[in-house]
Every structure is written in structure tokens, then in C-alpha cells.
Image (tube, rainbow, N blue to C red):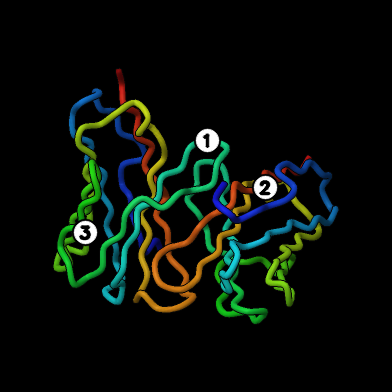
Amino acid sequence: DSGVTQTPKHLITATGQRVTLRCSPRSGDLSVYWYQQSLDQGLQFLIQYYNGEERAKGNILERFSAQQFPDLHSELNLSSLELGDSALYFCASSEGEGGYTFGSGTRLTVV
Amino acid sequence: DQQVKQNSPSLSVQEGRISILNCDYTNSMFDYFLWYKKYPAEGPTFLISISSIKDKNEDGRFTVFLNKSAKHLSLHIVPSQPGDSAVYFCAASPQRYYGQNFVFGPGTRLSVLP
């Protein structure tokens, strides 16, 4: 157990729907990052939050949004889902120096 | 434009031999580098890091080499074991400061054959 918790582990939904992915960072970590991994692709950075505030944005679609709550958990909202949004979505957290600790991911399948 | 490249999508190595995974980057501002290992159905796990003040960092069977002038780093695994079979991601960042975000390469799938 890495200490970063992501729920749900699997999600199957239809095109046009909206889903929310949840992430609880490691205790004490203030930064939360969201990454997308599509089939045979690397990890694409979506967005970073630090202590409740958006810190950096990557290749995140306008249909996607995220937030980090006062208790530091984060949610990634994906709306108007398309088939191409099917991917693994990873959350990671960090305390500062060094690298990230990743959660085990949420596998989203859009049908 | 990919800032971090891992040009070998896959690599097969015999058990007990050396595995060498390569990574190239284009952004000269990158100053801190990580390697992650990922098994199927799991999140990536941190393996080893190196900052630009060093050209080598070693941790057990894993050694990372950095050649800043060539913008190239490599991960050596010696000896390779079947349990090392995984996807390896190289990641880079401008500096090792609080709450930064890393750019990941596309990964190299290593298969260690018994």
C-alpha cells in the first residue's frame, strides 16, 4: 500500500456521461497530481494542486476539471465522456523534495 | 513535442545479464531525474533518482547514469531478475523544489527471461 488511495478502481460508463474520480494523498503530502495513461501511452500530466490551490496545468481537456478539498483529498471530474477518454487515471502525491507516490489508479472504460 | 523520450518501447534480457534502459531529454532546464517501475494493474513506484550535480547514483542492483552534455540518462540493472519485468518510466523536472511536476517518458517494457 503506497498510502495514496484512489477510488473507484474500475469504472464503466457510457459516452456523454460524467464521472468523478477520487484521490486521498499520503498523510502529510500537500501536493496532488493527476495523470492519464492511455493504452500504450506514457503518463500524461493533467493537473496539480498544492494545499487546495491549482498549481500547474498540463494537457487537461476543458471537459475535465479537478479540485482539492481542505482535507487535501482531490477529485477529478470528467464530463461529456468520449470513447477516447478510456484510460488509467493515476493520482500521485508528494511532500516536496523527491518524487511522487502514486496510487494504484482508476481504470475508466467508456462504452 | 516530447521533452522526455524513451526510444525503445520494449527490451528483452536474459536473467542474470545486464539490462540497460535509456532516456533522452530535450529541455536543458531539466535538473532532476527519476526512474519509476510499473507492474500491470498497479501504480508506478519510485525506483531511483539523480540530480544534475551527480553523474551516477547507485542503489543495490540499480544504477542511474546521467550525461548532461548529451541530455541522456540510463538505468542499469545488474543482475537482471524475472521480477524486474515491468514498464520503466523516466521522468524529469527543472529542479528539485517543493510541489513540482515531472514530465514522464512513454516507458520501456522490460522482459527478463528465465
- Residue extending farthest front: A27
The answer to whether dots 3 and 2 both sit on one chain is no
- Residue extending farthest top: B114
Badge count = 3
The answer to whether dots 1 and 2 both sit on one chain is no
Which residue lies under the disc numbered 1? B40
| Chain at numbered mark 1 | B
Q: Is residue B40 above or below residue A38?
A: above
Q: Nearer the viewer, mark 3 or mark 2?
A: 2
Label 2 sits on a secondary structure element that is strand
Q: Quadrant of residue B8?
A: top left
Using residue A108 as the reference point, say whether residue A43 is left or right of it.
Answer: left
For this rendering, which residue is in front, A90 or B63? B63
Indicate which disc residue A25 carries.
Answer: none
Identity of the amino acid at label 1? Pro
The percent position of residue A22, horizontal first and vertical second, equals 73, 58
Using residue A62 as the reference point, say whether residue A38 is left or right of it.
Answer: left
Q: Nearer the viewer, mark 1 or mark 3?
A: 1
Which residue lies under the disc numbered 3? B72
The 10 Å Cα crowd at callout 2, few under 14, some 14 to 19, many 20 or more, is: many
Which residue lies under the disc numbered 2? A106
The answer to whether dots 1 and 3 both sit on one chain is yes
The percent position of residue B94, horizontal first and vertical second, equals 35, 75
The percent position of residue A7, horizontal first and vertical second, equals 73, 50
Q: Is residue A25 above or below residue B37?
A: below
| Chain at numbered mark 3 | B
**Residues at marks 3 and 2, CA–CA distance in whole angstroms:** 32 Å
